[in-house]
Amino acid sequence: GRGVDHIGVAIVCMCHDGAGNYLMAKRGAAARAEQGTWHPLGGSVEFGENVLDTVRREVQEEYCVTPVDLEFLGYRDVHRINPEGQKTHWVLLDYKGRIDRSAARIGEPDMTDEVRWVTLDKIPEPMHSQFPLFLDKYKGRL
């Protein structure tokens, strides 16, 4: 499968309202890993899909809104061990995008327990293990 037999490619999108507030999601029971942790949304690039279309699809699926002003922040190689003990390798393409705060809601209730608007100095805990690296890398551009 993706990330195990071959490199997985995924997007991460830090959604904001244009006024310094960011929408964070708490991973639910059906999330692939790290259930109960807070993160910006993310998802796999599907075969044949344009990466920007992946970002738009994932934001629509997870928050029920269409992002605008998408900005590519950079990429990260992520090497981890999955819950089954297998080595994984993902290339994450990191974005930020503005969304309509009044329209955003949980689109995948099995994957997301809660969403919360926060400022960068008040990120809820526990954070997804990869999120502090995202913040360190992009803090000046968020």
Image (tube, rainbow, N blue to C red):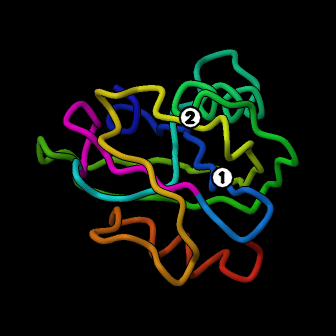
In the visual, does 85 lie left or right of 36? left
Q: Which mark is residue 15?
A: 1
Residue furthest front as drawn: 102
- Look at the image and give the residue range highlighted in magenta: 23-34
In the visual, does 125 lie left or right of 42? left
Q: Looking at the image, which is closer to me, 41 or 94?
A: 41
Residue 3: x, y in percent? 39, 38
As drawn, 56 above or below 22: above
Residue type highlighted by circle 2: Tyr
The answer to whether mark 1 and mark 2 are in CB contact below 8 A is: yes
| Residue 17 forms part of the magenta stretch | no
Residue type highlighted by circle 1: Cys
In the visual, does 76 lie left or right of 53? left
Q: For the residue carrying disc 1, how many other residues have a C-alpha within 10 Å: few (<14), some (14-19), or many (20+)?
A: many
Residue 125: x, y in percent? 30, 71
Residue at 53% x, 84% y: name it. 121
